Amino acid sequence: MTLRLHNTLTGTKDVFEPLEPNHVRMYTCGPTVWTFAHVGNLRAFLFYDLVRRHLRVSGYRLTHVLNLTDIDDRILDQAMHAGTTIEEFVKPYAEAFLEDMDLLRAERAEVYPRATEHIPEMVGMIATLIEHDYAYAADGDVYFRIASFPRYGALSHLDRAGLKAGARVATDKYDKESVSDFALWKKAHPEDEKLGAAWDAPFGLGRPGWHIECSAMSKRYLGETLDIHAGGIDLMFPHHENEIAQSEAANHKTFSRVWLHSEFLADATGEKMSKSAGEFTTLRDLVAAGHDPLAVRFFLIANAHYRSRVRLSDEALHAAGEQVRRLREFSDRVKRTPPAEHDDAQLAEKTAQVRAGYREALDDDLNLPLGMGLVFDLVRDANTALDAERVGPQNKAQLLALLDDVDAHLDVLRVDEPGLAEEVERLIAEREEARRARDFARADQIREDLKRRGIALEDSKDGVRWRRITEAARS
Ligand SMILES: [Zn+2]
C-alpha cells in the first residue's frame, strides 16, 4: 500500500516518502494564544492529528512540532489593557489550548515550542538574511526583501506581477522598498519592555515578526528540510510563502518537501467563518450547548474530506453525535454477542473488502469520510447478521480488528472510566513511593497492571506522565 498526499506545492497527489527512511519530520502552525481557539482553528489542529495518526498507522516514527505563538500585536494590546505581561496574559490560553486538544483526543505533538523561548534562533536567522541582502533594516524594523527571492509565490501560485499592487503583506507605517516586503523584526515601542515583549538584537531592541518564528523553530527541532509542513488554507498566503522565503534564503535548502493545507469551516453562505459575523465559536461554547467533544471531533475529521469546505451547524453536530453513538453501540454489540457456531462466509468476505477499502481510502490523501461510508455500510450488514445469529468466531474477530483500524484514526470508541484519572494518579504516587523505598518489584507490578488496563507510564523530566495505549500494545 502506498500513501499519497495532496501536495499544495505540486498541486497533485504525490506518493509520500520521508527523507530519512521510516522517520517523518512534520511542522504544523499552531495557535496564537491570545484567546480560546475557535472551531475553525480546531479543524486544522484535528487535521494535524489525522495526519499524525495515519503516518503512525503507516509505520513511521514521527517528530511533530506544533508551535504556540505567544507574541503578536493582539497579545501586546490585550496584555496592555489587562495591565499585565504578555507571559502572564497568554498562560490561561496556552493551557486552554492543550485542554481543548485533550478533550478532542488529539494526540500530543512531540514538541510545543513557544516563540518567546526561541528569540536567539530568530535573531540569528534574521542576521543571516541581512548579511546576504535578503533583508534590510528600516528605522529600527527589519524587512524581508521580496524582490530578492524570485521563487516567492510558488506555493500559492501567485502572479508576481500582481503581487505588489494587490498584496497586503505588511501594514506597518515604516519605510519599505516595496509594499509586499514583510517584517522580520519590529522596533520596540516604549511600553513593550514593561510588557516583557522587547529583546536585544544587533539591529536594535524589538520583537520578532510572526513569520520568522516558524522558520526558526522548525529548523531548531527538525532541521533545514521538513518532510511535511501543514496548516490551514488561510495560512498559505502570506504566512507560508514568507516562511519558505525566509528559510530557503537563509539555508539554501528546500524548506518543506510536502505542504498540506486543510480547508476552512464555512458559514451559511459558504464563506469563511469570521469573528466579525458573530461566528467565533469555541469548543467551550459547543460543549455548553450540549455537544459531546467527540461528536465535534467526528464532525471535524470524518464528516468531510480535509480539502473541502464544511459548514458547521447544530444539525451537523447532532448527526455526527449520532454516528459516534451508532459506532459505539455496534462495537459493544459485537463484543458482547456470543459467537454463532459457524462463520458467515459472505460477511467474512465483505468485512475483508471493507477493511482493505478503508485503508485504501486513508492512503488516498486521508479520505476518512470515504472510509467511514464503507464502514457504516458494513455495520448495517453486520447488524442484520447479528440479528440472525449468523456471526461466528472468525467474523467477530474480523469485525473487531476493523473497528481497531477505524479507531486508530477516529478515537471515539474507548470509554473513559469515571474516576480513572484520579486512580492512575494515585497509583503513580504509590509507584514513586515504592521506588523511593527501593521496592522495585512493587513499582514494576504497578506499571504492568496499568499497562494491562491500557495505560502507559512515561518518565520525563517533569515527572511521570501517562497516556492511553491501543489494545494491541497492551500485551
Ligand atoms: Zn507558521
Image (cartoon, grey):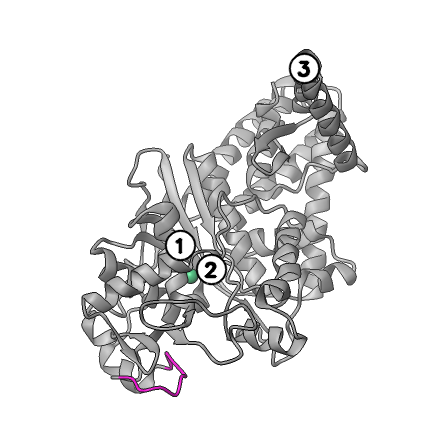
Count residues near mark 2 (Cα–Cα under 10 Å), then give few for <14, some for 14-19, many for 20+.
Answer: many
Above or below, 354 relative to 65: above
Q: Residue at the spot x=72%, y=51% of the render?
A: 322
Q: Residue at the spot x=72%, y=58% of the render?
A: 318
Separation of marks 3 and 1 at Cα, in angstroms:
41 Å
Task: Name the residue carrying label 1.
Answer: 217
Residue range highlighted in magenta: 168-176
At which x and y percent is residue 1?
A: 37, 34
Determine if the magenta segment contains residue 174. yes
* Mark linked to residue 275: none
At which x and y percent is residue 434?
A: 72, 19
Report whether 281 appears left or right of 261.
right
User: Which amino acid type corresponds to the residue marked 1 in the rendered image?
Assistant: Met
Q: Residue at the spot x=71%, y=23% of the render?
A: 431
> Do tag 2 and tag 1 residues touch (Cβ < 8 Å)?
yes
Q: Along the polypeptide, which appears first: circle 3 or circle 1?
A: 1
Task: Name the residue carrying label 2.
Answer: 115
- Between residues 235 and 176, which one lies in front from this camera angle? 176
Label 2 residue near ligand 1, CB within 8 Å: no
